[in-house]
Amino acid sequence: MLAMCAARLGRPDDAGLATGGPFPYFPSNTALLYAVAFMAAGWEGAPDRHAPGFPADQRWTVRFEGLQPGL
């Protein structure tokens, strides 16, 4: 949820893996794949570009297929 919120707010650099403590796992990471799909496919009202939830500065190469934009 944190990654999707960051993407919608136009802050894709803040959409990432939660880390800390003795283990690199937090319950928020359970939804990481869902968030990545959301960031790749977009959402209603998303910017009209490929993978709108990822930074637009060409640091990422995003490829996906069969994903539909979320709400």
Image (cartoon, grey):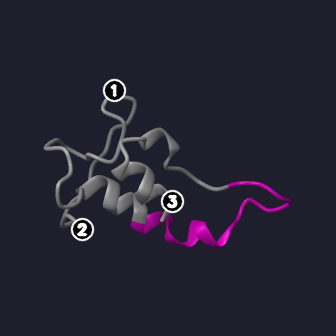
68 left or right of 36 in image:
left
Residue at screen point 18% across, 67% down: 68
Query: Which quadrant does the C terminus fall into?
Result: bottom left
Residue linked to disc 2: 70
Q: Given the image, on which type of amino acid does mark 1 rest?
A: Asp
Toward the top, the furthest residue is 57
Q: Given the image, on which type of amino acid does mark 2 rest?
A: Gly
User: Of the residues under marks 3 and 2, which one precedes in the sequence?
Assistant: 3
- On residue 2, the disc is 3
Instruction: Give the magenta part as a residue range.
Output: 19-34
Residue at screen point 36% across, 42% down: 10
Gap in angstroms between the C-alphas marked 1 and 3 = 21 Å
Residues marked 3 and 2 touching at CB (< 8 Å): no
Gap in angstroms between the C-alphas marked 2 and 1 = 23 Å
Are there few (<14), some (14-19), or many (20+) residues within 10 Å of tag 3? some
Gap in angstroms between the C-alphas marked 3 and 2 = 15 Å
Residue linked to disc 1: 57
Per the image, label 3 sits on a secondary structure element best described as helix
User: Of the residues under marks 2 and 1, which one precedes in the sequence?
Assistant: 1
